Image (tube, helix red, strand yellow):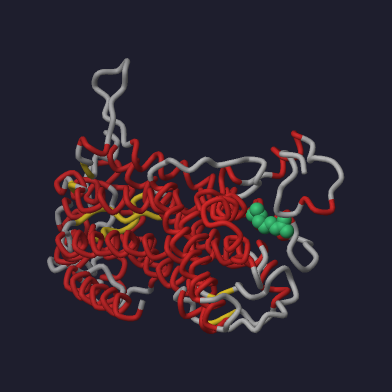
Amino acid sequence: MSQATNQSWGGRFSEPTDAFVARFTASVNFDQRLAPQDIQGSIAHATMLARVGVLTDDERDSIINGLKEIQGEIERGEFNWSVPLEDVHMNIEARLTEKIGITGKKLHTGRSRNDQVATDIRLFLRDEIDVIEVELKRLREGMIELADREAETIMPGFTHLQTAQPVTFGHHILAWQEMLARDHERLLDCRKRVNVLPLGAAALAGTTYPIDRHVTAELLGFDRPTENSLDAVSDRDFAIEFTSFASILLMHLSRMSEELVLWTSAQFDFIDLPDRFCTGSSIMPQKKNPDVPELVRGKTGRVYGHLMSLLTLMKSQPLAYNKDNQEDKEPLFDAVDTVRDCLKAFADMVPAIEPKKASMYEAARRGFSTATDLADYLVRKGVAFRDAHEIVGQSVAYGLKTEKDLSEMRLDELKQFSVTIEQDVFEVLTLEGSVAARNHIGGTAPNQVRAAAQRAREALSAFKAGA
Ligand code: ARG
């Protein structure tokens, strides 16, 4: 047999694989990342085979010891990855046979690389989901505490990016937190469908050996074996589901990033980000750039790209396994890495946001942000809303001309537009009065923000218990 022909399947071949084809079809350069899961899966498989009598206990022990040594070689960087051996699975199996002889070849009894790779990816993704979840919780906690601290801090709320009504900064941060709470639910929901064992499906139809898939599932911490062998080896919708979670999460982080970038600008001047999250410019000495949020915003694009890659990869694939599926790994790996890093960046950065309260307050004061409060005041005094809208519009026009906010006008100035206006109008024209008046669940009043932060805290710890 020629060296270039893979020893695992070379039996029926009469010439070696073309060197380019060997390189083109190999996945070892990227799927070696799955080595820990591949070994973990093989140990469970060998354990199960011994339990049902397909392997002797001695064979099992020799396989497990050999695999553990290989794990050490890989961790120490001593493992010699071979492209002619195609992928992580055959590299490890070939090394096992090299180390323990003929018994190494028995490990593959009752399985195929098709169910093996599906198992490896699911193990990998499940463990990464758990790491990602820790970062997501940390970020949510940071937001809840920031919101609680800033429950009374006033800023302008926007629609169309124009000053609309005053809100509290804590309320704004809790809006972010709500987005992440839904992402968190999506992640844990996705985990349920990831955590199912394909091993035992073998190439596509199952195996003639008396395997016990419940044993393997339990050894690997899977909730249950998959129901259908054809589906088990071909399905990658769990990876699509994860990347759609990732895309929605990154979409949310990109929105927060955009606001952080705007807020740190001299024009907004709403917050400061500590220097450790920023970099300077090599030409403009005065610059302090919000690189971290900018980069998170930018990384959203690659995650959307991975979602499109995986959706398109699976489109129209006939059952069961097709080599196309080898292309699932790089998008998934990069989506996982990007999500983890972006969440870590945000979880570190959010608690360090320093609101510039005076500047936010001034911005809210400048934009006639209590105009709706004046209209509501008139309605309470019996004026029809349409008329109130007109009266307030005229007051704002006057304010623009005289460069005065509504709260800075004298009573006689306001009375030009409606005689209904009395001294008590000033209670609603202040920013504090405006936010305090929105005093219901979901409203921006400081006591509502504190109560919402407390509910969010409780919901988050319930997540911890249920995860
Ligand atoms: N490297 C392959 C993959 O990632 C493993 C499964 C290959 N199976 C096969 N019959 N060629 O999908």
Q: Is residue 268 above or below residue 108?
A: above
Where is residue 284, by image quadrant? top left
Residue 191 is situated, as x and y percent measured from the top left of the image, at 48, 71
Residue, x 27% and y 33% (percent of image)? 266
| Front-most of residues 225 and 69 | 69
Residue found at the very far right of the displayed protein: 14
Residue, x 34% and y 61% (percent of image)? 136
| Front-most of residues 347 and 82 | 82
Residue 200 placement, left or right of 133: right
Residue 348 placement, left or right of 58: left
Residue 326 is situated, as x and y percent measured from the top left of the image, at 66, 53
Answer yes or no: is residue 325 visible.
no
Ligand 1 quadrant? bottom right
Q: Is residue 442 above or below residue 69?
A: below
Residue 65 is situated, as x and y percent measured from the top left of the image, at 43, 62
| Front-most of residues 30 and 116 | 116
Residue, x 14% and y 66% (percent of image)? 427
Residue 15 placement, left or right of 409: right
Tell me the quadrant of the picture where the C terminus can be found: bottom left
Residue found at the very far top of the displayed protein: 283
Residue 360 is situated, as x and y percent measured from the top left of the image, at 21, 48
Residue, x 79% and y 62% (percent of image)? 316
